[in-house]
């Protein structure tokens, strides 16, 4: 079966969970199907050996709204998959290419939903009017897709709520996974020294993007109430917008003036260094206000680290409350209450490192047994085959 995988992100240009998903899924799909990958940027080869064909915006899009540039890339991707039996798109950045290929070539289109645009209204800060285009592209693709893969039960519920015309039978659940051989505990602490961190100090770690979705400002405000013995490590790239940058820098500066041990690592680190940080942390913090699944929680669990996370979206599918970590209810109507409760849960584990350690070991066991990429690829191929039989 000839499959065309359509994505914005592909190694080495991976900045979020969708990119991680495509990276590892494509490695496992390659021996199972005839696979081509269409991505943004230049042609390149992934770590698993898969060649990805790159696409860039039309020259006519210079200076245009980013959403228009995205649609021009989708046109290029559509032209590149004429020989495929089925196309599988990831995120709104590639969904329209899948939909157009379905119309043009009469082939099935599978969509994996890593998030939903209507549930991320803060993106208007980035896209302006382009946000209306991104919502339209996603809605059109999802409503007409032959199968929709949700990465969690929460994500499936969101799809059926946001897009009520979608037939529930078309929405399948296939979670994000983890390479448990790659994401496993290491006692290497060279990255800790490199970034001026104390490996012997209780540590709360965040790894991710500085976006409204990830709730990082909530974490920084909560950290004012963390046990004073602990250090906070924010492994995060630059904020999405100038407005968020101003807010976030101000919060970090204020926190650093009131307590020591607050570290902001601005660049996105190589995977081996992230694994070192995850392995040495006492608690991994995930304060997201919206999260279809939260693959980074799996990565922390793979490295035997307890998780404190928001009880939103698909996170409860991954983090077992009281077993592999602690969940904190989130309400947009009471952000300060959420921050206080988050600090309390973090402190529970900082004050009881034996409990945190036990949760980390339970998390590792769960990640290995339930989230292997081989099984996830097999379930994905089964969906492809079911559509090919129709």
Image (cartoon, helix red, strand yellow):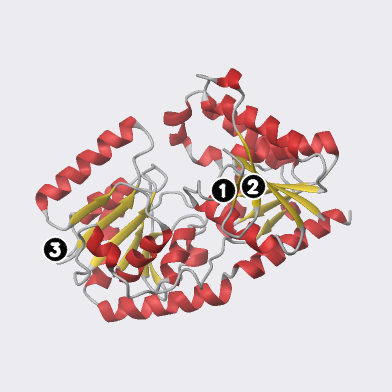
Do residues under tags 2 and 1 come within 8 Å of each other at their CB atoms?
Answer: yes
Residue under the image location 33 percent in, 78 percent down = 357
Q: Mark 3 = which residue?
A: 228
Q: Nearer the viewer, mark 2 or mark 1?
A: 2
Residue 91 point in image, percent of width and height: 59, 43
Q: Which secondary structure lies at badge 3?
A: loop
Image quadrant of residue 194?
A: bottom left
Give the spatial CA distance, label 3 vs label 2: 48 Å
On the picture, is 233 further left or further right than 127?
A: left
Give the spatial CA distance, label 1 vs label 3: 40 Å
Residue under the image location 34 percent in, 41 percent down = 238
In the rendered view, tell whether residue 18 sits above or below residue 71. below
Is residue 345 visible in the rendered image? The answer is no
Q: Mark 2 = which residue?
A: 52
On the picture, is 30 further left or further right than 359?
A: right
Which of the marked residues, 3 or 2, is nearer the chain's N terminus? 2
Q: Mark 1 = which residue?
A: 10
Do residues under tags 1 and 3 come within 8 Å of each other at their CB atoms?
Answer: no
């Amino acid at each position: 079966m000839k499959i065309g995988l359509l994505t914005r992100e592909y190694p080495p240009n991976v900045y979020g969970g969708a990119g991680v998903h495509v990276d590892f899924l494509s490695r496992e799909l390659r021996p199972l199907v005839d696979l081509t990958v269409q991505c943004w940027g230049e042609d390149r080869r992934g770590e698993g050996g898969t060649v990805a064909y790159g696409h860039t915006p039309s020259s006519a899009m210079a200076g245009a709204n980013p959403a228009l540039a995205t649609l021009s890339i989708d046109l290029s991707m559509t032209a590149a998959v004429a020989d495929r039996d089925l196309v599988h798109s990831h995120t709104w950045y590639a969904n329209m290419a899948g939909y157009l290929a379905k119309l043009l070539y009469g082939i099935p289109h599978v969509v994996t939903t890593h998030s939903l645009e209507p549930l991320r209204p803060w993106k208007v800060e980035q896209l302006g009017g382009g946000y209306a285009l991104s919502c339209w592209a996603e809605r059109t693709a999802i409503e007409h897709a032959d199968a929709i893969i949700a990465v969690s039960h929460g994500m499936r519920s969101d799809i059926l709520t946001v897009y009520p015309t979608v037939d529930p039978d078309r929405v399948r659940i296939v979670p994000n996974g983890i390479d448990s051989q790659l994401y496993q505990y290491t006692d290497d602490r060279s990255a800790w020294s490199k970034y001026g961190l104390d490996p012997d100090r209780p540590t709360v770690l965040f790894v991710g993007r500085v976006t409204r979705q990830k709730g990082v400002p909530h974490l920084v405000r909560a950290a004012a109430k963390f046990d004073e013995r602990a250090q906070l490590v924010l492994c995060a790239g630059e904020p999405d917008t100038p407005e968020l940058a101003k807010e976030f820098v101000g919060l970090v500066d204020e926190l650093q003036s009131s307590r020591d041990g607050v570290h902001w690592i601005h660049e996105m680190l190589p995977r081996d260094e992230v694994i070192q940080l995850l392995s040495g942390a006492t608690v991994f913090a995930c304060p997201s206000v919206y999260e279809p699944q939260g693959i980074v929680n799996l990565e922390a669990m793979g490295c035997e680290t307890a998780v404190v996370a928001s009880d939103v979206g698909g996170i409860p599918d991954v983090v077992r409350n009281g077993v592999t970590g602690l969940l904190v209810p989130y309400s947009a109507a009471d952000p300060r209450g959420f921050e206080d409760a988050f600090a309390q849960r973090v402190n529970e584990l900082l004050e009881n490192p034996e409990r945190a350690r036990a949760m980390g070991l339970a998390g590792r066991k769960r990640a290995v047994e339930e989230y292997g990429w081989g099984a996830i690829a097999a379930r994905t191929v089964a969906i492809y085959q079911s559509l090919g039989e129709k």
